[in-house]
Amino acid sequence: MFPQQPTWSNSRINLLQRCPRAFVLRYGLAQVSRNHERGEILSIAFQIQTPWILLHQTIREVVLDYVEDHVNGTVWSNSLIGLRFKMDFEKAMRMRNRLIERIQSHNHHTSFQEKRPEQHLIDMGIETCITFIQHPELQNLLAEGSIKRIGLTKPTQYRKWKIYSAPDFIHHGPKGNSLIKLNLYSLPSRNNRERQAALTRLYGNLDSTVVLFSLKQKKWIVNRITPMNVQVQQSLDLVANDAEKMESILSLVGRNNDLSLIPLADSYRSCMHCNVRFLCPSQHGLEKAKAEQRALMCR
């Protein structure tokens, strides 16, 4: 049986909602069998990201380093920003290709294919970095007070659970503290922004304002939210419910690490870019795999 993992993060709950089977493989089997070939393959597979995700991960790292250097008195030129992004993105793509090669060396064939960095993605990434750095909201934050980078791997504690919802920066200014967070993949709905801000406020104080920079269609949209205590508590209650669902799914595995009771994805769209489809019954068709699973459960 998998050990309890009292941990909450957006990535965990999103994966659970998309596909409970993939959730169990990533946060259960891959961890308890990390010293065996199957666990190693799983761990490697979940590290492989699409070029689109690597693009946005690189944007995040470049702008975080820019702000950190700016605080220390070093201001990058646009040319340096472009060079830095290009080098980091190409490095990320090389690492991705090496991971795919490692999977293939175990005689497994994933849906991911080795790719070279495409110039239009490099251009898009550079443009996105520059527009963020030149954004008036960020420039105002850099001009007043102090700003400190926070690692995304820094959790906060609530009851028995560790919650990963750290801001990217904490800004101390004349009007109080601001918690700055980047949403690189889309503009969340209003409800999701409010929940995200409520959990992010755990890293500040009662009066902290959360500043969300969301990227939508190559444009940065800024939302300032000062969560109320009731919103923070409501979000924490949702975290508690999510964590219970995660533990419940993991408990279905049982002592023999049997995955037959773990539900598969609800939609084939979840399988299209799944990292571990090559280790899942759905590789031969999701509906066929779900029918076989139902038959096993009825025995």
Image (spheres, helix red, strand yellow):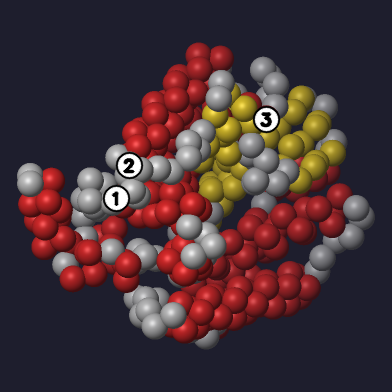
Tell me which residue sits at (70%, 21%) in the image: 205
Q: Which residue is mark 3?
A: 203
Q: Are marks 1 and 2 in contact (CB under 8 Å)?
A: yes
Query: Which residue is at the front of the view, 110 or 192?
Result: 110
The amino acid beneath tag 2 is Gly
N-terminal of the two: label 3 or label 2? 3
Q: Which mark identifies residue 254?
A: 2
Residue 269 placement, left or right of 127: left
The amino acid beneath tag 3 is Tyr
Residue 296 placement, left or right of 218: left
Q: Mark 1 falls on what kind of element? A: loop
The amino acid beneath tag 1 is Asp
Tell me which residue sits at (67%, 52%) in the image: 135
Q: Which mark identifies residue 258?
A: 1
Residue 72 at what x, y percent from top left? 90, 53
Quarter of the rendering containing residue 243: top left
